[in-house]
């Protein structure tokens, strides 16, 4: 469009000058002269019209290009959202609230607002380089895992540096984990040296993380999350940004367009997760549990779906899993927590370790709490997590000590039956092949799901567990965990 401005300007100036001269000398012109000037005037008009058309076409092309940029950004954002199962919908909410907060702070530069809008969607792009077990790990990350997680800001910015954005997106993504006091990462810059977009994004990012469910805690209330921001004001976050966000918090969060955008993004992200889950399911559907795990299965060998009210179903499935684990991970402990609908809790009904069965038999976990409770409430699988999040100090009662957890929901006909959790002494947990085997054994008796999109979080889950245990006792609480984003 800028290339068209000189030509359009010259054409307009020439036409305007010609028209002015014609008007000033109209009385001195003869009809013959008018016969010459009239076609020239018409030609100038046509030329001006064509120039205006070219400008309009350039504007249309620019709008289409901008839409293409946004569509590409949204596609990348949904890919990130689909990979990180724990923070579904996070990036779209952060985008909406970041732009609104920027406007509250007086940011009027259209390029800066566009940069914040794009960066908010792409701020977690670098997580594509972080292993999924780290992204979805409900427990505290090890120092090595945390260092790997910290790379996502720089990795994401480096990826975006290769894209010629018409606004400064890269710097916002690179510095959104920097702190006001200079103790952040990746470069440790501080204060006003941090781009305003990054300072805005960090506050909104933290607030949304605090007010979202995590495997190790329930979502904080608005007041609790605000208290955390206030505590970190001036040390981790820009005081002016925090104060402005708190003052406008309810208006920003309750905005109707925010909810609509978030719901739209969640619907698209859910479709992507379903495709990913379907692809993974197809990858293992042609495999039979046998001595040779890679032996193809005939179509006629597929087991018929079990009934939820078949009382032997859960027990037989569990026994098969226990026998398998005894051969590959002798020290592993498998537990089936059955869903007690009336009490909204999970009760340990089957324990593979006879030596330690008395420690877990009839142990109770509230649905939605601890690791297994979170898996049951959200119907999502968790791999390589800390057993202490589920068992507390009991994790150290085993010899050798339990150090890793694999947990998957047991669902049949869209009804939660229970949760299968496997605790192992190996820090690396079960291998991919072992997880695939256990998952297929579960599928022989029940149908696990890794997506809770069809069951709203606030809606009570209806199920009738055939293994209701009497007198459940609570599992001792894990050691306190500090709240962090």
Image: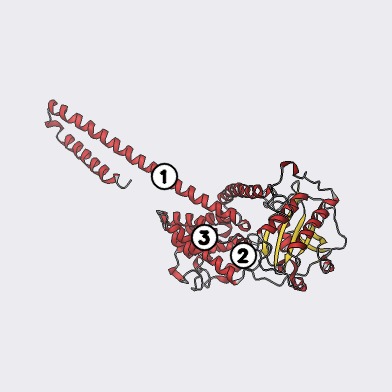
Residue 144 visible? The answer is: yes
Q: Earlier in the sequence, mark 2 or mark 3?
A: 3
Contact between labelled residues 3 and 2, with CB atoms less than 8 Å apart: no
For discs 2 and 3, the disc positioned in front in the rendered view:
3
Image spot of residue 263 (x, y percent): 60, 49
- Please tell me the numbered disc located at residue 126: 3
- Foreground of the two, 292 or 326: 292
Q: Residue at x 45, y 63 (%)?
A: 196
Which residue position is annotated with label 1? 63
Q: Residues within 10 Å of mark 1 (few under 14, many from 20)?
A: few
Measured as percent of width and height from the top left, residue 296 is found at 69, 47
The residue to which callout 2 is attached is: 225
Residue 169 position by quadrant: bottom left
Decide: few, some or many residues near mark 3? Use Cα within 10 Å; few <14, some 14-19, many ≥20: many
Residue found 29% across the figure and 38% down from its top: 51
Mark in the foreground, 1 or 2: 1
Q: Is residue 197 visible?
A: no
Q: Quadrant of residue 336?
A: bottom right
Mark sitting earlier along the chain (1/2): 1
230 lies left or right of 67: right
Quadrant containing the C terminus in the rendered view: bottom right
* Disc 3, SS: helix
């Amino acid at each position: 469009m800028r290339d068209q401005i000189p030509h359009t300007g010259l054409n307009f100036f020439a036409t305007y000058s010609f028209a002015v001269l014609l008007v000033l000398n109209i009385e001195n012109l003869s009809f013959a002269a008018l016969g010459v000037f009239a076609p020239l005037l018409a030609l100038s008009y046509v030329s001006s019209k064509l120039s205006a058309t070219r400008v309009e076409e350039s504007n249309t092309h620019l709008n289409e290009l901008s839409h293409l940029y946004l569509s590409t950004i949204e596609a990348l954002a949904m890919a990130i959202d689909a990979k990180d199962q724990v923070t579904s919908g996070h990036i779209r909410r952060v985008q909406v609230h970041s732009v609104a907060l920027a406007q509250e702070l007086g940011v009027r530069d259209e390029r800066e607002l566009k940069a914040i809008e794009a960066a908010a969607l792409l701020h977690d792009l670098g997580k594509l380089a972080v292993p999924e077990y780290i992204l979805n790990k409900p427990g505290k990350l090890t120092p090595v895992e945390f260092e790997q997680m910290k790379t996502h800001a720089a990795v994401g910015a480096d990826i975006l540096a290769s894209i010629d954005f018409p606004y400064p997106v890269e710097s916002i993504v690179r510095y959104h984990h920097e702190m006001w006091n200079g103790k952040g990462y990746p470069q440790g810059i501080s204060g006003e040296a941090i781009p305003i977009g990054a300072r805005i994004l960090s506050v909104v990012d933290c607030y949304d993380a605090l007010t979202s469910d995590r495997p190790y805690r329930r979502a904080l209330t608005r007041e609790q999350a605000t208290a955390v921001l206030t505590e970190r004001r001036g040390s981790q976050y820009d005081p002016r940004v925090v104060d402005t966000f708190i003052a406008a918090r309810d208006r920003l969060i309750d905005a109707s367009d925010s909810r609509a955008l978030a719901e739209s993004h969640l619907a698209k992200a859910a479709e992507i997760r379903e495709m990913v889950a379907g692809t993974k399911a197809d990858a293992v559907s042609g495999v039979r549990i046998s001595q040779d795990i890679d032996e193809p299965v005939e179509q006629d060998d597929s087991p018929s779906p079990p009934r939820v009210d078949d009382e032997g179903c859960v027990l037989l499935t569990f026994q098969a899993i226990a026998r398998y684990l005894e051969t590959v991970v002798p020290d592993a402990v498998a537990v089936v927590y059955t869903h007690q609908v009336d009490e909204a809790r999970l009760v340990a009904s089957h324990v593979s370790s006879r030596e330690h069965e008395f420690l877990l038999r009839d142990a109770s976990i509230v649905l939605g709490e601890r690791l297994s409770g979170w898996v049951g409430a959200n119907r999502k699988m968790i791999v390589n997590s800390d057993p202490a999040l589920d068992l507390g100090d009991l994790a150290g009662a085993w010899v050798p000590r339990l150090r890793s957890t694999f947990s998957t929901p047991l669902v049949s006909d869209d009804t939660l039956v229970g949760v299968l959790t496997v605790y192992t002494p190996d820090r690396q947990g079960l291998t991919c092949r072992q997880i695939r085997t256990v998952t297929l054994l579960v599928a022989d008796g029940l149908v696990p799901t890794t997506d809770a999109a069809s069951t709203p979080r606030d809606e009570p889950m209806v199920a009738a567990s055939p293994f209701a245990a009497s007198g459940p006792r609570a599992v001792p609480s894990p050691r306190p965990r500090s709240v962090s984003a």
